[in-house]
Amino acid sequence: MINEKLEKAFNYQINRELYSEYLYLSMQAYFERLNLKGFVNWMTVQVQEEHAHAMGMFDYLNQRGGKVELDAIEKPEIDWSSPLEVFEHILTHEELVTSLINKLMDVAEETKDRAAISFLNWYLKEQVEEEDNVGNVLATLRLIGDDKKALLMLDKDLATRTFVAPVIG
Ligand code: FEO
């Protein structure tokens, strides 16, 4: 049986991962409007990843005899001024998620739940990758500036990203 405080913290993070999914879906719609299909693809993969993150915790909480409690998901932003602004937003968002996973880890440590600590290590490593991936696209977008041709080349590159279902935990 999982500690109540840790159960609550897991439920909060499930909500945050679902919000991330929602936010990236909104960004996907933004790129659909710009007709940048490679960026759309990148967001589609991101949406799937966030769903997998949420479900990883959902399944884990069930496995530990906890009660999954889904909460309302707030409305994400729907407009950005440019692809650059989108990726700046993503980096800020992922940095926030990293801090939330660290807080969840703090609760797991506080409650001396070694199984949960081990499980959450996967999420910490995943956040390092997430921030790195986003940071790379952001750096390229900064180099591109107003060069439309270069933006279309990046779009082609982002079209190659594929979703690989993660093995969590
Ligand atoms: Fe689930 Fe992008 O962190």
Image: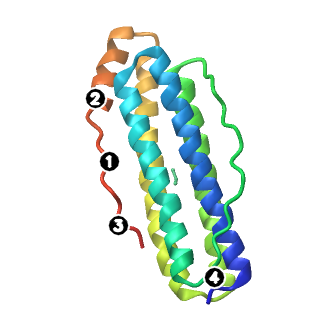
Q: Residue 90 appears at what percent x and percent y?
A: 55, 38
| Alpha carbon separation for disc pair 4 and 2 | 41 Å
- Queried on whether the Cβ of the residue with tag 2 lies below 8 angstroms from ligand 1, the answer reads no
Left or right of 81? Residue 56 is: left
The mark lying in front, picked from 3 and 2, is: 3
Q: Are marks 4 and 1 in contact (CB under 8 Å)?
A: no
Q: Disc 1 marks which amino acid? A: Phe
Q: Where is residue 37 in the image (x, y as percent from the top left)?
A: 36, 23
Label 2 belongs to which residue? 157
Residue 126 appears left or right of 78:
left
Q: Is residue 145 above or below residue 53?
A: above
Foreground tag (1 vs 2): 1
Q: What element carries label 1?
A: loop
Mark 2, residues whose alpha carbon is within 10 Å: few (<14), some, or many (≥20)? few
Between the residue at mark 1 and the residue at mark 3, the CA separation in whole angstroms equals 12 Å
Q: Where is residue 113 in the image (x, y as percent from the top left)?
A: 59, 87
Q: Mark 1 points at which residue?
A: 163
Specify the amino acid type for callout 3. Answer: Val
Kindly identify the residue that appears in the image at 58 percent across and 57 percent down. Answer: 98
Q: Compute the Cα span from label 4 to label 1.
A: 32 Å
- Is 56 placed above or below 41 here? below
Q: Name the residue under label 4.
A: 109
Task: Please identify the quadrant where the C terminus is shown.
Answer: bottom left
Q: Quadrant of residue 14?
A: bottom right
Query: x and y percent of residue 6 in the render?
Result: 68, 78
Q: Is residue 56 above or below residue 137?
A: below
In the rendered view, tell whether residue 98 sits above or below residue 113: above
Q: For this view, does 137 lie left or right of residue 5?
A: left
Which residue does the numbered mark 3 point to in the structure image?
A: 167
Q: Earlier in the sequence, mark 4 or mark 2?
A: 4
For the residue labelled by badge 2, is the local secondary structure a helix, a strand or a loop? helix
Q: Between residue 12 and residue 96, name the one nearer to us.
A: 12
